[in-house]
Amino acid sequence: MIIHRFRDVPDFPFARYYEDPAQFIQAQRYWLALLRETEGFDEALWHPTPRTENLADDMYLGKVLDLVAPPITKAMSIQTFSLEGDINMALHENGPMDPVDVPRSLDPVQRAAIIAGTPEDKLYRDTIAHHAPLMAWVEKTTIWHAEAGHAAGGAEVAVERLILTSTISEVCEPLARQALALFLQDGPAAERVNAAFP
């Protein structure tokens, strides 16, 4: 297992990736090592998805790898995850809000409820109760593929994209590897992956 190579790294399993750049980078290293040792992964085909880099957003979401392989019309987004990160996101998105960020045009009662947010203890309970250590699915989308000599500089290409969100753990590693291997097999992957990870 790849996980055993990282056990002695400080802050393993990098559960606070959302606030500590060093943990985020170690999580990124872990997922890249796992991907490189997954059956069917051809590193020469895969490249980072062209996009504006925003480390704060990537850390918040745990987005450690965002890759595309236009020749095989596939893309993948791998997000590291933890219960702590899940709670952080719940508190950030559902906790108290700055009144400046809430439209004044809303009904006063509704506006007051949004500003107050969901009570912290309820957010903790609900997040813990619904926390899923691993989620994987394939969706159909389009990506921009730059082409030299193309009149518009490139074109939109239909692809299948794997979304893999997983904690770093002995339980999740084989499941994550399975999702990746199913996705990387030749041909359409949505039915194969979505059936294995309903």
Image (cartoon, rainbow, N blue to C red):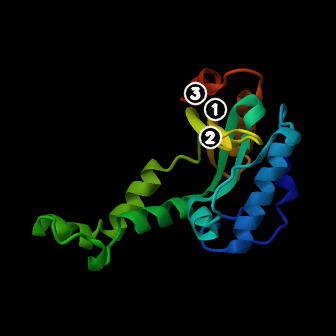
Q: Along the line of sight, which residue is nearer the eye, 83 or 191? A: 191
Disc 1: CA contacts within 10 A as few (<14), some (14-19) or many (>=20): many
Residue 185: where, in percent of width, then height? 77, 25
**Does label 2 or label 3 sit earlier along the sequence?**
2
Q: Residue at x 76, y 52 (%)?
A: 31
Quadrant that contains the N terminus = top right
Amino acid type of the residue that numbered disc 1 sits on in the rendered structure? Val
Q: Along the line of sight, which residue is nearer the eye, 11 or 182? A: 182
Q: Which mark is residue 159?
A: 1
Amino acid type of the residue that numbered disc 2 sits on in the rendered structure? Ile
Q: Are marks 1 and 2 in contact (CB under 8 Å)?
A: yes
Disc 2: CA contacts within 10 A as few (<14), some (14-19) or many (>=20): some
Disc 3: CA contacts within 10 A as few (<14), some (14-19) or many (>=20): some
Q: Are marks 2 and 3 in contact (CB under 8 Å)?
A: no
Q: Along the line of sight, which residue is nearer the eye, 3 or 99? A: 99
Q: Which residue is mark 3?
A: 194
> SS for tag 3?
helix
